[in-house]
Image: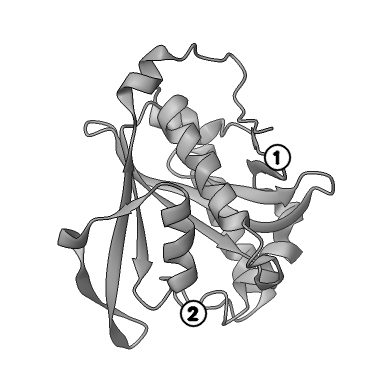
Amino acid sequence: MIDVATFYRSLPVLETQRLLFRPLTLDDLPCVYAYASDPEVTRYLRWPAHPSLYHTERFLRQSLDLAARGMDASWGIAIRKQDKLIGAAHLMDIIRSRRQAEVGVVLARRFWGQGYGTESLEAVLGCAFNQLGLERVQGVCCAQNIAGQASMARAGMIEDQACRQGVWQKGAIREMLVYTRTIDKRKADSQTPTPRPSIKKG
């Protein structure tokens, strides 16, 4: 397993058939604000909609600072042919000793219902298992977020019903579901590692 701080400081660029995953930059501020300020996008997320562009800029600067220190980092999700940012993906709470982490994906509303959520999850899961050396990744989802549950299921994640719990969030108790996926060690052992830090599907 590679060093987590090194991973965050040099977040690998990932590619899928339609999407590009790259480190966020300050140039992404308008696009991040566009989805982060949408109450429908943040409806089932842990954080509230950003009230102003200044709020998003402060958030983005803090995120970039954490990445530079190797403490945390998120990918910006872009359409490959346009490099237009449509959301973000996050591999967080990495526990090296247990080889596990949590994944999260957020997309601008106009890009919902097109399979981008599942495609994003598959890319990040592939990176977690094949590049970072993790063995278990989970995603936490509000029970009312049917689309989020469907995306995780299509990405091969399975609900761990023993982990259902009520969580106080945004002024109410919400039932949270946990979906997990573990690495297929037999398949991983049979694969030859690739020297390029990217994922391609074709």
Q: Secondary structure at mark 2?
A: loop
Is residue 59 shown above or below 44? above
Q: Quadrant of the N terminus?
A: top left
- Quadrant including the C terminus: top right
Q: Which mark is residue 59?
A: none
**In front: label 1 or label 2:** 1
Residue appearing at x 64%, y 50% in the figure: 76
Query: In this rendering, is residue 192 above or below 186?
Result: above
Q: Which residue is mark 1?
A: 17
Distance from Cα at disc 1 to Cα at disc 2 = 29 Å
Name which residue lies at 41% across and 64% down: 149
What residue is shown at x 56% (from left), y 15% (from top)?
A: 194
For the point 54% across and 53% down, the residue is 118
Q: Is residue 23 left or right of residue 104?
A: right
Give residue 165's quadrant in the image.
bottom left
Which residue type does callout 1 highlight? Answer: Gln
The reply, left or right, for residue 155 in relation to residue 172 is right
The first of marks 1 and 2 along the sequence is: 1
Q: Pointer 1 and pointer 2: residues touching (CB < 8 Å)?
A: no
Relative vertical location of residue 31 with respect to residue 5 in this rendering, above or below: below
Task: State whether residue 104 appears in this view.
Answer: yes
Q: Is residue 30 left or right of residue 32?
A: right
In which image quadrant can residue 23 be found? Answer: top right
Q: Can you name the residue that lies furthest to the bottom here?
A: 171
Residue 11 x %, y %: 56, 34
Q: Residue 49, position in %: x, y?
A: 55, 78
Estimate how packed mark 2 is, as few (under 14), some (14 to 19) or many (20 or more) residues with alpha carbons within 10 Å: some
Residue 162's x, y, as percent? 15, 60
Q: Mark 2 is on which residue type?
A: Arg
Q: Residue reaching furthest right?
A: 82
Q: What residue would you read off at disc 2?
A: 43
